Every structure is written in C-alpha cells, then in structure tokens.
Image (spheres, coloured by chain):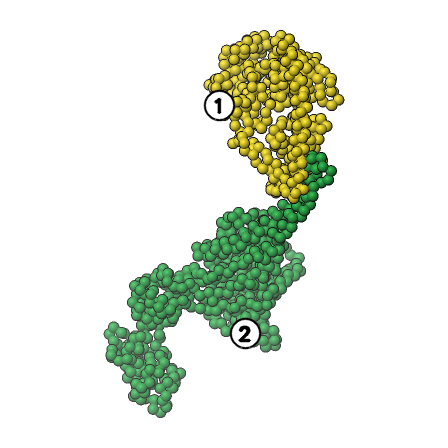
Amino acid sequence: MVKKQTKKETKKQTKKDKIDKSKNLISLLKKHGAQVYEDLENGEFPKFSIPNRSISNIIYDKKLRQYVLGTNTSLRSSRNSSQLRSFTQLLWLAFFANKLTHEKKSSTLRDVYYSSQAFAVDFEDQGESDNIIVDLEAVLSQPREDFYVFPEERSSIFGDLTIEYTIPGYEGKTQNLSSHPDGYAIGPSMTSAELVDTSAELVIAIEKGGLFTRFVEEQVDKKFKSIIINTGGQAPRSTRTLLKRLHDEMGLPVVILTDGDVYGEHIAMVIKSGSANAAHLKGLTVPDAKWMGVWATDIDKFKLPTIPMTESDIKRCYDLLKDPRYQEGLWKRELEVFIKIKRKAELEAFSKYGLNNITEKYLPKKLEESKSF
Amino acid sequence: MSSNEQFNQISPSEFFYRNRDLAGFSNPTRSLYTAVREFVENSLDACDHSGILPNIHMTIKAVDPEKPDPKQYILTVKDNGPGIPSKHVPLAFGTVLYGSKFGLKQARGMFGLGATMAILYGQITTNKSVKVKSNADGKTRFDFEMLLDIQKNKPVIVKKQETPSSEKGLSVSICLDGDYSKAGTKIRDYVYQTSLITPYATISFDDPKGEKFHHKAIIRSMPPAPTIIAPHPYGIDVETIRRMLVDTHYQIPNVDDKMIEKVRKELGMSKKKFTYDEIMKKTEKKWKSLSRPVRVVISLMSFLEADFEKLQRIRIEDVDLRNNKLVYWDYSTSQTLVAEMDVESHYYKQLANTVQGESLTHFLSKRFQRVGPTAALEFCKFAKFKPETRVGNMTDQELVKLSDALQTYEGFRSPDPTCLAPLGDGPLEKGIERRFEPDFMAVVQRTASAYSGFPFVIEMGIAYGGKIETRGTTVYRFANRIPLLYDEGSDVVLKVVKDTDWNRYKVKNDSAPMIIVSHICSTRVPYKTVGKENVADRPEIEKELRLALQFLSRKLSGYMSKKGQAEMAKKRANLYSKYLPLVAQFCTELSGNKKEPNYKEMIKEETALTNSEGSLEEVKKNG
C-alpha cells in the first residue's frame, strides 16, 4: 500500500516535470533566438557558446557515476567566415526544434537532414546534421528526444506495464504492453507516455532480439514478474530514458543480460553510467542497474561453448582497462578474465544444453546471485 | 654573317657527312626541323650583328604534295640582313666549317656549321643544288646555284647570275627529304617561340599545307649587338694559351720593299744617302721615336753590319741568346753563317726582348679581359711566377702550371658581359605580356657570371593566369635567343624548376596556369649534344638559374597571397550574403518577432571590405 502511494505521487510529480521541461525548452530556445535577433539589430555578429565535447573536456564524475563535460566551451560566431555556415545550421536546428516541440511532432535524425533542404540550409550529409544536433543538445543541455528528434527505433519492450499516451491524437489512451507477443517498439510515443501501472517487480534488459522472443515464449515476464526490454545491441537513448524512468518512477530494479564478451560488458556499463558521446547530457543513466551476465567467469562455470576473441576484441579490452569505471570490482575482474581466456560466449551458447536452459537454469541462478552484489 | 667579318677555312666536310647524326640530321623529321633552325638562326644572327631589325620570311613547300611523308620539300629562308659579298658566297655555303664565328661573342649558332650541314643533307637526300641569292651592297643581287664536292670540301658553282636590285639581304633555298606531318608541330612551335624571345623581329612562315603564320615585331628597338672581346682567365686551357703565345711572339719582320720604305721614312732619310753607315748614324739620334719593327730590323743590321741589299739576301734562322750568336742563311752563297752579338748594346736588348716575348704581367694584362697590371702582379704572386718572366721562354711544364693557376686564382673580376646580348628585362617583359596576356608577370636579368671562363647571363620571366591556357608549369627554354624544343627532360632549367617546392610559393604546381621563360646567354652555351637542344647542368649555371627562379617565385608568391586574400574575401562576402538572411529569418521566427532585424548594413560592410582589400587589378600591377 505504502509503495503504491509513493508511486502515484511520483507519477504526478513527473507529469508536472514533463510539462515544465517542455515549457523550459521552448523558453530556452526563444531566449537564444531573441539573443541572436538582438545582436543583429545592434549590428553585431551573433554567436553561440557550445560546451566543448573534445576528449580533453570529458571527465568522469564519480558522484554522478557518469561522464560529464568539463567547463571548457567554444564560441561559434557568425563573425568567423569558417563558422558562419555551421552557426546558421545550428540556429536553423533551434528554429526547427522549436517548431517540433510546439507541434509535438517527432522527427528522426534522417528527417532532420532532409528537412533542412526546405530552408536552403544545406548539410553535406546526415553525419553533418547529426553533429549539429549534438551541438544543440550541448547548448541546451537537453537530449534531442526532448525536442522531438529520435533515432530509428530498433529496441522493444514486453511485459505487464500500462501506459497512457501523451502524443497528439492518442492523449489519454492507455495500453498494456503484454498484449502483443512480439513486443512494442520503443519510440517517441513510448518514451513520452505516462507510466501508469505495473505488476512487475523487475526489468530485464537483454541485448538480443532472438533471446527477447525466447523470453516472451518462456513467459519470463510472468515467471519472474518482469518487464523485458530488447536493447538491440547498444541501448539507444530512448531505451535508456525508458529504463531510467522505469527505475526512478516505478521503483523497479534493472538487470542486464548480454553476450559474454567485452562489448556485452560495455553495453551494460553504458546503461549504468552513460557514454562519453553523451557526456553533455544527464538523466540517461541507471546507476543502480546490474549486469547479470554473461560474465567471463560464467563461461567456465556453466561450461559454455566459446569462440576465440579477435584482435579488435582484445584491443577493446585493453582500451576499457584504462576507463575509470573499470578500475574496480566486478567490472575490472571480468574484464581481466576476458583478457586472460581470450575467448567469448554468446547468449545463444546456452542452447547447447537445451533451448530453455537459459531461462530455466541460468536466469534463476543469476537473479538469485544478483541480489547479493 | 656580315660582310666585314673574316672568313677562314678550317676542316673538311667528309667528317660531318659521316657524322651527320651529331648535328641533328638523323632522320627526315629531325632534319627538316634542324634545317629550318639553322637558316633562321643564321639570318637572325646576321641582322643582330648589323643592327638591322630582322624581317624573316620562311616557306616550306612540298615538291609533290600528293606523295606521303617523308618526301622532298623545298625550304626557303629569306632575310633583310646584310647579305654576303659575292666572292664569299661559294665558300660560306659550299664548305663545311668555313665560319665567321670563331671570335668570343654571343651568337645563336656556333661555327657556321649548321647551315652547310643542312645544305649537305639536302644534297645527299635529293641530289639537288642549293640556291643562294645575296645582295650585300644594295646594288646588285648575285644568284648562285651550287653543289658541294664532299671529298674536296669545295663548292661547285652550277650557275651564277647578277641582277641589279636595291633590296639588301640573303635568301637560301634547299631541297631536302623531310617529314612535315611529324615535324610540323615542332617547326610551328619553334617559329612561335623564336618570336617570343625576339620581340623585335618580324617572322612569317608559310607552311606546306597553305597555312600562314605571321608574328609581327612587338618592339622597334633591338638590344645592343654583341662585340668580340678578349677571353677571361677562367677556363683557358694550355692549348689556348699556347696559341695566344704564338702570336704574342714578336716575329722578325720580313724585309721587303715595303719594310725598307718604312725604315727610310721613320729615319727621315733621302734615297741617296740610304747606306749602312748613314742609317746607323741616324738611328743613334732617332732610336726612341722608331717603331718596334724598324728597331728590330736595324738591330739585325747592326750585328750583321749589312745594308738592305745584303739583308734581303739572307734569312735569320736563330737568335741564340745563350751564346750571343746570330745564325742566318745566306741565299747567295747557300751556307749558314754566324754573327757575334754584343751583349752590352741596346740592339741586343731589343732583339732579346723580341724573341722572348712580353713579360708575364704584360701578357696577362694585355691579352685577357678583366686583368689589369695590379691584378696581374697579384696573380704572379699567387702562382709563384716572377712577374718579369718572359712568356716566350716558358717551358711546357710552366705553361701547364700557368693554366692551372689561372683557373684556380679567385682574384679576377667576373667576366665582361659586354660580349653578351641578353634581351633585357624590358623587351622580355613586353614579349611575354603580348604573347600570353597574363594576370601577373615578373622578369629578372641576373648579373653576368661565368663557367669555365665563358661569361653568361641568365634572364628569366614568370607569368601566371590571364590568357595562359596551359595548366601546370610550362617552361619555355631559350639559349642565345634560340628556343630549345627537344630533349627537355635532361635540361638544367627543367631540373631547377622541378626542384622548386612550389607549395612554398602558394602555387599548385600541377594545375596552375603558369609559364616560365628562361634565357641563357653565353659566348658558349654548354649544350649536351651538337643538336643544341638541352643545356648541361654546370654548377655555375644551375646556381644562377636557381637564384633567378627564387627571385621570381618570391614575387609570384606575393601576388598569390594577395590574390588568395582577395579570393578569400570574395568568398567571405558571398558567405555573408547567403547566410545572414537565413540567420535573420530563423531568429525572427524563433524569438517570435514580427519584423526581421536590420542586418543588411552588415552585409554591405562585409562586401565593401572585400572591394577595398582585395582588388585583383591592384595586385596585378604591383605584384
């Protein structure tokens, strides 16, 4: 009972937050626009101050348990002829984001690239427009999803979770996410929806679509009272936002299941503490999330069939060893074992012992184990 | 070949007949081109040396136009030069190595060898005679038809004819095997480039296909004609010194009627009293005023105690200074006789001086350019020769030592360039400007330098942009106002251009519309081959070329950076007029304003800035 009440209060709070956030964003954009307008009116060249996103300015914040940007900023001035073009692009994007936010219309990264052409602001390729989007994120300190720019969706969710849409045309409509066995795509409508209710006590994030389907078939959601999320490899920002909300708003613990290799380990790490690429953003991490497996030590323990690591796998291991987040505990230990055995195992490796071996044997064991770390 | 030059017969044509490849007559293509060059260059040289603005007309006609190449062509080159006196014509065109170019001065051709080679080649391939029309005095034109007797190296005159004519000049026409379809490009290039380096000449060319090329003179003044001068000490070899010494020796003069008359006049004597005793008496009084040959003759008389009658009957065989004896041959008695010489008398000194030749210092300062009495003394100190050494007494070893020392001594002033005829930076600049109409150009004439004693001057010009159509660096090479078209790969000029790091001068070497004109003037251009197409990389020449190119490149670099700035500014202005309106539009909508901010002034300012900063017109002239 007590728990539920807390949940409801949190929910109200978040709803208000969301509206404020949107309002804040719009006023922030307007403020930037007004500044540029004023500069021009005064015959001055307008400029943006953009937090520097170069490696030298990315530092690990132990308190926040994620990467953050340092205090270095760089100026992008329309006075400078070599910056004029990207200044205009950035201003255009602000203008475009303002439009999207007002109209609550979502747009993909690719959409942004093409939309620019209607305004004679040309991007050479999508790579260039993607960069400008990150610039705007840094200027506003807001993720692009907040101004309705989303990546292509590839991750999905399944489980007993009721949501209420907020996007135009679906406002107030609710949906329970256990009605369709293929799962639900995590797109703008999902991330912006209100999280109404759930019977689940756990979120399992899994790296691969194949295993996600198996878990649904094996009714892992029911057996373990869980919400299952397919991250589709490295979890997209929207998925990470959703994971964070499930944890923060619904009070659900998050566990992560990946392949038994260095990339799997890092997928878990990014969900837990973010990526250097998104160091300019906060609110994308679930610091309490737990990496459940497959660990390097599990390979031997569960007698999993393995394949040898490639040169680049090994190089990646050594690179991560330098990362401040891999300096202690489980993360360091497993990484070192990977380096030692130089072999890796995929989630599918459990099929050697039967298709449901992973859900029947491995999962319960690891879940039990995870309570203790 | 001007009329007052001296002609000397040197060597047989047989050798050149066998080695015609060396002179550029290896095949019909090359031969046609070489023949064109030889005649055009001879004409230009002749005009230059006589101070006449050249007007040269060349025609090449196929004997039978229907035939495929290679075939017989008639090549005719006509000029408005001084012509050749009729008595010299047969030898000048009918003998190999009959040259007027053995002095030390700059000329296009060397030795006058090429023209005769061309005639020789024509005769070998077509068995037709050469036709020469010469008018040297502006009154009569002499027309010759000649063949060469190769073994005897002598001309055979087939036909000779005189016509009154006031038009001075020379016209040479030969029939030869050629390949115009292959040589045509080179010949047209040659004519074009010649007009570039000879902007004071009018050159026209009617080619076998009926095309007419006419390059009119751009300027009406010509550079001063080169003069013959004494050699510079650097690079004189032993053999040259030996030859110079021979005519340094004062020879015992021939005692003929002329000589006797000279002696009598100098002594101021009547024919009656002109006896031995009277002569000796008069001489005592007048010795100091007598000329050298007269003194020598009288000295001889004094020792022989002979009058002129006797003196004419003998021949002096030796002046033996060691034994103080005078050895002579008496024709009347047919025997060798000896007379004693009195060492104390001034007659002895006179004879000794004559036989031993000049002192070394005197020889050096009189016979070489850039060597004065002081320099000669300094040199003797350096070379460890006694200044008063008589050159006539020097042994072979001493001559070798002298020649070595002359080349290693560094105290001589650099060679006298007055014997050179560079085009001058003015005419060169005009030539380049009119032919290429570039955006930027600069020319430089280096001061004279020397390699192995031969003076040379480097002139160079650089042109960029404008109506230059070629991309990448095009190098026009000239030597003594001759374009060099073949064998450019191994040429020293190309080497220097290639070695230059053009990025340093803000030039994109492979795409820049750039032209370099390089002109080497020298009394002897060090060609690698007899074909005279590429210049050998003598370190002294390479250095001068490098310095000239560096100077010009720096100027170009200055232009390029101004041009770069101008282009940048223009680009900038374009950027502002493109993007500022967009910025205004977006910020207006974003801030919710109704009216766009007033930004137009800002664009205007940026554009105005461009116009004042980077006007290309200004850059062009101030380079």
Q: Secondary structure at mark 2?
A: loop
- Protein chain holding label 2: B
Q: Quadrant of residue B29?
A: bottom right
| Image quadrant assignment for residue A254 | top right
Residue A253 seen anywhere in this rendered image of the structure: yes
Residue type at tag 2:
Ser
- Residue nearest the observer in this picture, B102 or A72: A72
Horizontal and vertical percent for residue A66? Answer: 54, 23
Which label belongs to residue B86? 2
Identify the residue at image location x=46%, y=62%.
B448
Lateral position of residue B250 relative to residue B144, left or right:
left
> The numbered mark 1 sits on a residue in which chain?
A
- Residue at x-position 31% and y-position 86%: B285
The residue positioned 74% from the left and 23% from the top of the image is: A168
Q: Callout 1, which amino acid?
A: Leu
For the colour yellow, the matching chain is A
Whole-percent x, y for residue B479 in the image: 51, 60
Q: Where is mark 1, residue-wise? A: A321
Shown in green, the chain is B
The image quadrant where one finds the C terminus of chain B is bottom right
Tell me: residue B53, above or below residue B326: above
- Spot the residue most to the right: A169
Point out which mark residue B119 bears: none
Q: Quadrant of residue A206?
A: top right
Quick one: A346 or B252, which is closer to the camera? A346
On the image, the x and y values in percent for residue B385 come to 30, 65
The residue tagged with tag 1: helix, strand or loop?
helix
Q: Residues within 10 Å of mark 2 (few under 14, many from 20)?
A: many
